[in-house]
Image (tube, rainbow, N blue to C red):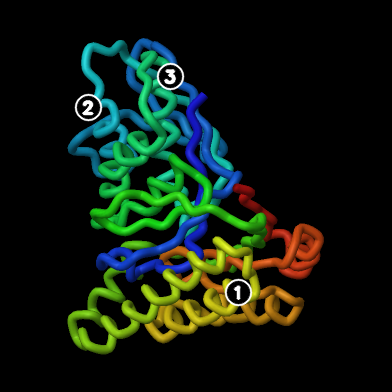
Amino acid sequence: MGFGRGKVILLGEHSVVHGSPAIAMGISRGISAVARAAEEDLLTLSPWGLQVRPRSDGSEPLEQAFAIVLGTYSNRPPLRVDVQVDLPSGAGLGCSAALGVAIFDAIDGALRISRSREELGRMAHEWEEVFHGSPSGIDNMAAAVGGVLRYRKGAPLKPLSLARPLRVVVAHSGERSKTKEMVSLVARQLASNPARVHDKFDDVSDLVDEAEVALSIGDMRTLGRLLNWNHGILSSLLLSTPKVEDLCRLARAHGALGAKVTGAGGGGCIVALAEDGEHAHRIRDVLGSRSFVDEVRQ
C-alpha cells in the first residue's frame, strides 16, 4: 500500500516559491494506492470514478503525470494502480502532491524497490510540475515525509522538533483554490513592485524563524500570533477571500490562537491553531462539517 499525506502550510506559502523558507505540517488524511501487474497500464481514482491511461502528449494533466511516473521505471510489467482519495482537490491541502507520492510508493512496493521517504518526495516533484508549473517542492516533501518540516529550495529538508503536540483545525471555505493562478498573481505583483513584495517575503522569513523557535519551546500563543501576521501579509497580496476571512474571524472568536489561509489561497482552506485537543474539537464544531482536527506529536 502506497500513501501520500495531505499538508497544511503553517507559514511561508508563496514566498517559498521565490526562495524563502516555509514551515509545513503533514496531516493524517491523504491518498492511498495499490499497484499490481495487469494487462495494460491503468490508473483508477476513487471516489472520482476516473480511469486514466498514460500519454506523454495527453491533453489531461493526469495522463501526462502518469506517463512521467511510469517512465522512471525500466523492465517492468504493465501496471494497474488503484487510488483512494481522501483529500479534497483545489483546497490547498496538497492533493496532487499526495497523489504523486502515493502512486510512486505503490509502484515501488509492487516492484520491490526500497527508497527513503525523502527520496520518494523528491521523485514526486516532476509529477507536481505537470499540475503547478513551478512548484516550490514543499508539498511533495510534506506528502512523503510527514511531521513538521522547515523547507527552503536548495537547502536540506529540516524536520522540526516539537516541545508540545501541535493541534490544528482545518476548515474548507467551499471555494476552489487554483494554485497556478494564485502563483501567477503574486508573480505579477513581484514584477510590478519588486521592493514591496520582497519586503513582505522578508517579513515572512522572519516569521518562519520565530515560529521554529516557538515550536521548539512549545510557545503556542506566540505561534498563533505569527500565523495571524502571516495571514495579514497573504491578504495584502490579494490571496484571501471574504469566505476565508469569515472562517478566520470565526475561529479566532472561539479561541483559536491564530488562523490563516493555507496553501495557494484565493479560496481553499484555513488552518486554525488550538491550545489542546479538547479546544480543537470545540473549534471544529463551530467551523462546521467541512472542518477536521489534526495533530502532530514529535
Secondary structure at numbered mark 3: helix
Q: x, y (%) of residue 116? A: 38, 30
| Mark 2 or 1, nearer chain start | 2
What amino acid is found at the position of numbered circle 2 in the picture? Gly
Most foreground residue, 238 or 50: 238
Residue 23 shown left or right of residue 215 in the figure: left
Disc nearer the start of the sequence (2/3): 2
For the residue marked with disc 1, what is the amino acid?
Gly
- In the depicted structure, whether residue 251 falls above or below residue 112: below
Q: Secondary structure at mark 2?
A: helix
Residue at figure coordinates x 32%, y 14% from the top left: 78
Mark linked to residue 224: 1
- The reply, left or right, for residue 268 in relation to residue 42 is right
* Viewer-closest of 205 and 288: 205
How packed mark 3 is, by other alpha carbons closer than 10 Å (few <14, some 14-19, many 20 or more), is some
Mark 2 to mark 1 CA distance (whole Å) = 44 Å
Q: Are marks 2 and 3 in contact (CB under 8 Å)?
A: no
Q: Residue at x 44, y 75 (%)?
A: 207
73 sits left or right of 105 in the view: left
The residue that appears at 63% across and 49% down in the rendered structure is: 297
In the rendering, at what x and y percent does residue 194 appear?
20, 84
Q: In the image, what residue occupies the spot 37% across and 73% down?
A: 205
Label placed on residue 109: 3
Give the number of the mark in front: 1 or 3. 1
Mark in front: 2 vs 3: 3
**Which numbered disc covers residue 71?**
2
Q: Amino acid at mark 3?
A: Gly
